[in-house]
Every structure is written in structure tokens, then in C-alpha cells.
């Protein structure tokens, strides 16, 4: 079984890698599905333990509303689920609230019952408040780490497409993905054919996604969401931003000097920078750049990924915090920090 996406020559010129940004509503749905998955990927294991340990009523309520797999609001797609203002945030989360409330009502009518609500109707107010509480518990504390890994992922894929072409990019999305002439084949539960016919295709990285790429929108420019794959191997398991901040001062004393600070700043300015690129930017030898990068990597400030004979370096969330000089426990990304309680 496979999903086959048919490209024309025009579509190949309109293949786009979406910016590396967190899509909170999408990640909420996907993370709740991961929360219910006992055979979870190792990179989510500590996150899942932390969320379950807090015994959140909101997490339990929403887990009862969201199916364990396959479900996704038809009105919500990752590329359009990025909001830059408080007003847009409310609108996007309100869309998710309406979708969950409607799903719950339909299931209740068929005899389904949520243990936390009994037979009481699932109200939009209850769902909205639960979404805001869950976001504050399971997404916001990890936002810097998620964003750093998404940025690393996109940078590596961009370089892959630039150096080896579109076929290399497409086949990197999943080990079983194939490029057959002008057709992209992805493992799927059903045989389907999608003809782009000049509309192009947008690729969107999702952090909490399952293992397979999936087509999440067919209207306008179709959107294919793919799971982040490179970053977990280079940046390690997902960690709470607040939990790592206590190690910063000790790391500073142990490792940072003028040259090493310049190397870290260069990596932060240009994620995916090569070792030779670092040497040129900081005006040191390649051997020296490699040595400094190794120390920074061991300290958890940068992540390195091997691509053929080249090593690419990108900042971790801890490295970004160090450069920003911000306490992640007191500084939230603008979009996530402004979301009011939905009513």
C-alpha cells in the first residue's frame, strides 16, 4: 500500500520546505497521541514520563477526547497552524476546540462516555481551558528544545537538497520512501494517487509526528507533513528547557573563552554550518574549529550531524539560551506566551 504523489516539471520548481516553526495546535494533537502510545520513541520517553508524573486533569481529559492514531482536524494543517499574535492564537486554538467538541458530541451520541465527564456534554469552555492548561504543561516548557531541533532538521534537509538534489530530499523523508521518475511513493494504509498538476508541494516538519509522512491538506498547495528524523540523533532526547538551565554557569566556567564563544555564536547564526565554514568565519584553522566544536558538543551547546564526509553543526536549545542570556523558565516564545484562556 502506498500514497503516490505525481509531479510535473512545474511542481518540481514549486517544492517548498516550510520554515522551521512550532505549530502548537498540531503538536498538541500529535503529542496527545504520543502520550497514549506505550511503545513511544526513546526521544519522547522522558517527556512522556514527565507529563504523566504531573497527573494533569487536562491531559487525562484531552487524551480521552483525541483518538490514539490517525485522527486530525480537517480544518487544521501544520503550515497554517502557526500564529504570530495573541488574536491568531485564539482563533487557531478555537478551531481545535470546536473540532474536539464536535468529535466528542458525535461519539457521545453513539454511546461513548468519558470517565472524567460521565454523561455530561463536553462543552467548548471545558475543552478550551484544558487545551490551554495542557499546552502550558506539555508544549511550552519544551518549546526551545523543539524549535532548536526543528531548525536543525530543516537546515540539514535544505543542504541535502542543495547538494544532492530533490530525489535525495524526498527519499530522506522515510526509509521506505521511493522516487520513481516523477512519482513520490510513501508507505500508506491505502493505495492513493495525488496529481499535483502545477500546484507544487509544501513539506512541513512535525516534531511529535508518527513515523510516516502524511498528506494533511490537498486543497490549494498540498501539504505533506513529515516526522523530524535527523535532529533526534544529533540533539538527543527531548528535554525540558528549564531542567537544563542550571548547568549553564558551570559550563561557562569550564569551557568558554573568546574563540570558543565566537564558534558558538557562528553556529547559532548559521545552523548547519560545516567545520571548514566555522574555521573561515572565526578565522582559525580547521583543526582548531573541530576541537572547539567537540568541546561545545560535549557541553551540550551544539549538536553535530554527519552527512557523508561533512559534519554539520547546529545550536541546541541550551546553546541558544546561553547566547540569548535568557532564563527559559521566565521567557516564553511570543506566540505561546500570549494564549489566553478560551471561553
Image (tube, rainbow, N blue to C red):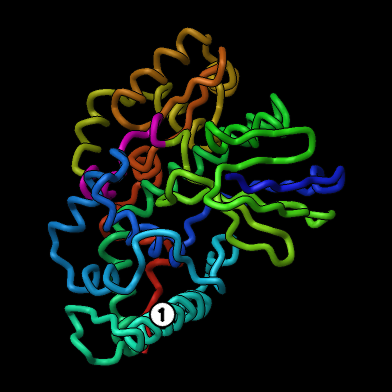
Can I make out residue 76 in this image?
yes
Is 64 above or below relative to 303? below
Magenta range:
232-245
Residue lying at 18% horizontally and 73% vertically, measured from the top left: 57
Residue lying at 19% horizontally and 32% vertically, measured from the top left: 250
Q: Nearer the viewer, residue 165 or 292?
A: 165
Q: Nearer the viewer, residue 130 or 260?
A: 130
Relative to 193, is 209 on the left or the right?
Answer: left
Can I make out residue 341 in this image?
no
Q: Nearer the viewer, residue 179 or 311?
A: 179
Q: Nearer the viewer, residue 188 or 91?
A: 188
Relative to 267, is 16 on the left or the right?
Answer: right
Is 152 above or below relative to 139? above
Can residue 235 be found in the magenta stretch? yes
> In terms of image quadrants, where is residue 156?
top right
Q: Quadrant of the C terminus?
A: bottom left
Dominant secondary structure (helix, strand or loop) of the stretch shown in magenta: helix
x and y, in percent, of residue 290 in the image: 45, 14
Relative to 139, is 177 on the left or the right?
Answer: right
x and y, in percent, of residue 295 in the image: 33, 19
Can residue 142 be found in the magenta stretch? no
Q: Quadrant of the N terminus?
A: top right
Q: Secondary structure at mark 1?
A: helix
> In terms of image quadrants, where is residue 258?
top left
x and y, in percent, of residue 184 in the image: 69, 41
x and y, in percent, of residue 2 in the image: 60, 45
> In terms of image quadrants, where is residue 154?
top right
Instruction: From the image, tell me which residue sits under label 1.
Output: 103
Residue lying at 59% horizontally and 66% vertically, measured from the top left: 80
What residue occupies the far right of the structure in this picture?
A: 9
Amino acid at each position: 500500500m502506498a500514497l503516490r504523489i505525481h509531479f510535473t516539471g512545474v511542481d518540481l520548481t514549486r517544492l517548498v520546505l516550510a520554515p522551521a516553526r512550532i505549530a502548537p495546535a498540531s503538536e498538541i494533537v500529535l503529542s496527545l497521541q504520543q502520550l497514549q502510545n506505550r511503545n513511544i520513541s526513546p526521544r519522547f520517553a522522558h517527556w512522556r514520563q514527565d507529563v504523566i508524573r504531573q497527573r494533569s486533569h487536562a491531559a487525562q481529559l484531552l487524551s480521552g477526547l483525541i483518538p490514539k492514531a490517525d485522527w486530525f482536524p480537517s480544518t487544521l494543517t501544520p503550515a497554517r497552524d502557526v500564529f504570530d499574535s495573541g488574536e491568531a492564537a485564539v482563533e487557531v486554538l478555537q478551531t481545535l476546540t470546536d473540532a474536539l467538541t464536535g468529535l466528542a458530541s458525535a461519539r457521545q451520541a453513539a454511546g461513548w462516555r468519558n470517565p472524567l465527564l460521565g454523561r455530561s456534554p463536553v462543552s467548548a469552555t471545558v475543552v478550551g481551558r484544558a487545551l490551554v492548561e495542557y499546552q502550558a504543561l506539555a508544549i511550552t516548557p519544551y518549546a526551545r528544545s523543539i524549535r532548536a531541533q526543528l531548525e536543525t532538521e530543516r537546515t540539514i534537509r535544505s543542504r541535502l537538497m542543495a547538494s544532492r538534489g530533490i530525489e535525495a530530499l524526498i527519499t530522506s523523508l522515510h526509509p521506505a520512501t521511493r522516487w520513481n521518475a516523477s512519482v513520490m511513493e510513501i508507505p500508506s494504509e491505502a493505495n492513493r494517487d495525488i496529481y499535483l498538476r502545477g500546484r507544487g508541494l509544501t513539506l512541513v516538519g512535525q516534531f511529535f509526528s508518527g513515523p510516516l509522512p502524511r498528506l494533511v491538506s490537498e486543497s490549494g498547495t498540498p501539504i505533506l507533513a513529515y516526522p523530524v528524523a535527523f535532529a533526534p540523533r544529533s540533539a538527543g532526547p527531548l528535554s525540558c528547557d528549564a531542567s537544563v538551565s542550571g548547568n549553564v554557569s558551570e559550563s561557562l566556567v569550564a569551557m568558554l573563552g573568546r574563540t570558543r564563544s565566537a564558534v558558538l555564536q557562528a553556529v547559532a547564526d548559521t545552523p548547519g554550518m560545516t567545520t571548514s565554514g566555522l574555521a573561515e568565519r572565526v578565522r582559525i584553522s580547521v583543526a582548531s574549529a573541530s576541537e572547539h566544536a567537540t568541546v561545545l558538543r560535549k557541553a551540550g551547546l551544539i549538536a553535530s550531524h554527519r552527512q557523508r564526509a561533512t559534519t554539520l553543526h547546529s545550536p541546541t536549545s541550551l546553546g541558544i539560551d546561553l547566547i540569548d542570556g535568557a532564563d527559559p523558565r521566565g521567557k516564553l516564545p511570543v506566540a505561546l506566551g500570549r494564549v489566553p484562556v478560551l471561553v
